[in-house]
Amino acid sequence: MSPECGVRVPVPVPVRVLR
């Protein structure tokens, strides 16, 4: 997965799900 997880990016899903 890209390092974007640590950065706040405009994603269709909440960042909480990625973690």
Image (cartoon, rainbow, N blue to C red):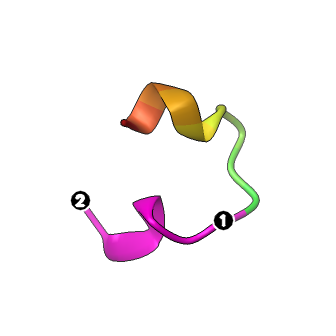
Would you say the magenta stretch is mainly helix, strand or loop? loop
Residue occupying image coordinates x 45% and y 70%? 4
- 2 part of magenta stretch: yes
In the picture, measured across the screen, residue 14 lies left or right of residue 2, that is right
x, y percentage for residue 3?
34, 73
> Residue at point 23% right, 59% down?
1
Q: Earlier in the sequence, mark 2 or mark 1?
A: 2
Residue that numbered label 1 is attached to? 8
Instruction: Look at the image and give the residue range highlighted in magenta.
Output: 1-9
Residue placed under numbered mark 2 in the picture: 1
Q: Is label 2 in a helix, a strand or a loop?
A: loop
Q: CA gap, disc 2 to disc 1?
A: 15 Å
Amino acid on which the number 2 mark rests in the picture: Met
Location of residue 2 (image quadrant): bottom left
Name the residue located 68 percent from the left edge and 50 percent from the top edge: 11
Residue 14 in the figure: left or right of residue 6: right
- Residue 17 locus on image (x, y percent): 48, 26
- Which image quarter is the C terminus in? top left
Q: Mark 2 vs mark 1: give the one in front.
A: 1
- Left or right of 7, for residue 6: left
